[in-house]
Amino acid sequence: MSFMNSSHAREHGLAEGNQLGHANGLRMGQCEAIMQKAARDRAPSPVWDVRVLFITSGKGYPYEPLDIAVINSLRPLVRELIIGNSDKDATRMGHPKANAETLAARHRPDVMIVLEGMNLSLNTVDKVRQMGIRTAIWLTDDPYYTDITAAYATHYDYIFTLEVNCVQFYQEMGGGQVHYLPLAFQPEMFRPRPVPKGGHRDICFIGSAYWNRVGVFNQIAPYLAKKSVIISGIWWERLQHYRLLAPQIQLNTWMPPDQTATFYNGSKIVINMHRAFDDQSYNHNSRRISGASPNPRTFEISGCGAFQLTDIRDDLVNFYTPDYDIVTYASPEEMLHKMNHYLIHEEERKQIAMRGLYRTMRDHTYTNRLITMLSVIFGPR
């Protein structure tokens, strides 16, 4: 390379770096101001003078980040937090003394809170209750696994479900203390962050290719092929137009939270599409309980300060205001119209994303949810 070419490349690189740094700095400054305002407007977190035994899901990735989010959010809210494993997980790791029954007998907690519960035996739950210890379960996959959860949920004193349409289902099964408690987001995992060079894209979707999603993406594939797009998850080879989008698909990957957050931050539009309650190939919901509540991705996207375009869920209006801090679509045609609109109208898109960040930071952290749970079990503080 000649000196002139080298000098030109260096100047071009400096200009590009300055532009990226300026854009990142401006956005991060705006986000930081909004997060500080949300923190000021959030009520102070109470502390309960109780000892809590928390039993992790025991299902590994992708549930492990959820276990961590609950642990990190629960610890400051109680006098003492003891972490235990499900029966299968404790056996697998060679730590039988870390199982729920042993820890409950040793520490005599005021409550045992179980996440998901599929790997914890009913015999263990019943023995803990016989010790006079209250038990609570937070079900994280309703309504899609209700054929399975129906067998064990009512063994707990308190049932918390992330799906509002499942409350009556568990009540009718005999679960007296049933409460709606949606999932949330963990600010330490999903938050505004600088976007690395090459990390900016027009449109992003991260998630598995359930058939309802495949149907929509088949219709919008020609539009996406003309944009800068990232799609990541399992089963996307199901697409009729897979070859058309293949260069922009990370196939059969489980993206960790930090990488997911980076893609959310770098995308002008992040699509959210809930899985169907009646999926024919991967579903355990024979009662066909419909889904009305937002998935955790709803909060994680907005928690990154990203613009979110989501399908409509009946309960969404209790968390966000459509066209103010989130944008919804009811059909592939409306999705295409709104993607085109918000890619052009940058300032409007950014303002909606910032309002979504504020609402999420103020109202939809795991700390918010666990305060609700502990208030139900022990009374408000």
Image: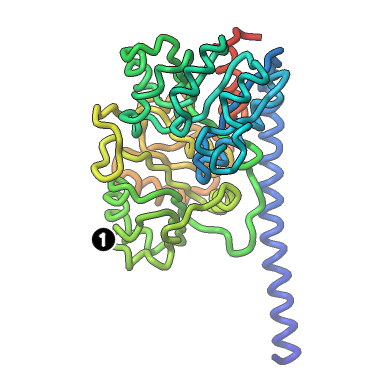
Relative to 331, is 51 on the left or the right? right
Depth check: give the residue in front, 380 or 294: 380
Q: Which of the 4 quarters of the picture holds residue 224?
A: bottom left
Relative to 257, is 28 on the left or the right? right
- On the question of residue 351 being in view, the answer is no
- The residue sitting at 66% across, 9% down in the picture is 381
Depth check: give the residue in front, 6 or 124: 124
In the rendering, at what x and y percent does residue 144 appear?
34, 34
Q: Which of the 4 quarters of the picture holds residue 355?
A: top right
Depth check: give the residue in front, 45 or 133: 133
In the rendering, at what x and y percent does residue 270 appear?
47, 47
Q: Which residue has dot 1 on it?
A: 240
**Secondary structure of residue under mark 1:** loop
In the rendering, at what x and y percent does residue 7 appear?
75, 82
The three-letter amino acid code for the residue at tag 1 is Gln
Depth check: give the residue in front, 256 or 91: 91
- The residue sitting at 41% across, 9% down in the picture is 176
Q: Which of the 4 quarters of the picture holds residue 45?
A: top right
In the figure, 16 relative to 134: above or below?
below
